Image (cartoon, rainbow, N blue to C red):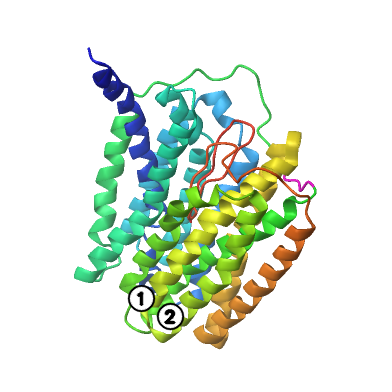
Amino acid sequence: MSRSANRAINSQPAACLAFALCMITTAVNLQAPLYDALAARDGVGVGATTIAFACYVAGVLPVLLGLNGLADRVGRKPLIITALLLSLLATALTLLAPTLIAVGAARFLLGVSMGLTSAVAPVYMQLLVGKADNRIATNRVTASTSLGFGLGAAVTSLFLFHSPSVTPPSLWIYLVAATLALIVVTPLADSPPDTTKRSLLRLPSYPPGAFAFGLAILLAWATVGLVIAILPSTLQRHGLSSWSGFATFGICSGGVLFQPWARRYTPRNATLLGLLILPIAYALIAWGAVQGSLTVVLLGTVAASSACYGFIYLGGLSGVLATAGAAAPQASAGYFLLAYIGFSLPVITTGMLIDTVGHALALTLFGCALLGGVIAAVVLLHRAPVIGGRASYPFSTNSPQEGAAQRVSAVNTTSHTTGE
């Protein structure tokens, strides 16, 4: 048999896992373009929508911080299968009961699903690829998950153009595709569980200089969360809510294009560049949404993605792990704790403000807070210890949405996925 044939055979399991990872992340933002319609149907405001959206964080954080060593005890494939089943259940729930309460419950299940996936995806991919260079596994995980985070929202938007509905065909199509992913991933090989009982708990900590990078990712993911959860209601005022899925696609999936550029910089410089881009990109998003300029909104989301999932995410994670040394697991936990605080609390606060003072003023206040946070993060970064070398993935990582999500597990050389 030829070498090319052997390579094709060896790549099949990795392709099956990549498909499964894409389906898991596709579910995360599949219902995002429906938030405004569901809120209107339930007779609630933007604040309630953001609370339902933030239920994702309530699902993902306990798994990431409290069950990080679960893969060592049960294996990797069972966690991927469980994540797919939870994604299927979450999607079926929103089909059976298209309400904002159901979306909140589904977001919680999807958070648990992403927490389980984050703990195993890169290491499992490395096992299936079977090569010494982990960059191959990293690239496959990055491509499949970053595509998925934006794909679900974009496909839902496409169907909404044709026929507005709170149960569009994209949800049914997802059930079929995720079931297929479950079928192809079930026969995959897996390594036996570790007999040593490693602690499941990872407590967050902040070595000198790490908090500055954590503040940067908090600001970045707050912007991502706002685009996913709040932008549809703002665009609805101009009859453009069906386009919100493409805005989600832009801010979740565009950043991966800028990661090779980010690798040329030191962690601090990459993060600083992202912080410089972030308020400008947000200004484009907010102004375009308030004025009803779709082109400006989409341009702003891609620019924001370059900052959030290109320069800040990559530079910040590299910087935290470089400063942490032996405390990398705790520092990684601290980094993503701040990231998810940004993904939830500022978004909920802004949603409540919109119900009280309107979109324009609430988005302006968010922008002022964002600018103040950026200035504080820049000052802290300049005071932080200098870190040499270029920004890189010390472990396998990839883009988010949420973002989401990925999150890095420094203990098991794994990554975590944002979503949103």
| Viewer can see residue 248 | yes
| Viewer can see residue 45 | no
What's the amino acid at mark 1? Thr
The percent position of residue 420, horizontal first and vertical second, equals 48, 56
Determine whether 350 is above or below 198 in the image.
Answer: below
The percent position of residue 384, horizontal first and vertical second, equals 78, 54
Residue range corresponding to the magenta coloring: 203-207
What's the amino acid at mark 2? Gly
Determine whether 267 is above or below 166 in the image.
Answer: above
The percent position of residue 406, horizontal first and vertical second, equals 52, 46
Badge 1 marks a residue whose secondary structure is helix
Instruction: Answer with left or right where residue 360 lies relative to residue 188.
Output: right
Give yes or no for residue 205 being in the magenta stretch: yes
Determine whether 383 is above or below 392 in the image.
Answer: below
Q: Quadrant of the N terminus?
A: top left
Residue carrying label 2: 288
Label 2 – label 1 distance at C-alpha: 8 Å
Give the class, few, some or many, for how many residues have Cα within 10 Å of label 1's Cα (few <14, many ≥20). Answer: few
Give yes or no for residue 383 being in the magenta stretch: no
In this rendering, the count of numbered labels is: 2
Quadrant of the image occupied by residue 407: top right
What's the magenta bit mostly, secondary-structure-wise? loop
Q: Residue furthest top?
A: 1
Task: Please name whichever residue, 359 or 201, is drawn nearer the observer in this view of the structure.
Answer: 359
Which badge, 2 or 1, comes first in the chain's sequence? Answer: 2
Q: Residue at x 43, y 39 (%)?
A: 139
Residue carrying label 1: 295
Task: Please name whichever residue, 165 or 181, is drawn nearer the observer in this view of the structure.
Answer: 181
Q: Residue furthest left?
A: 162
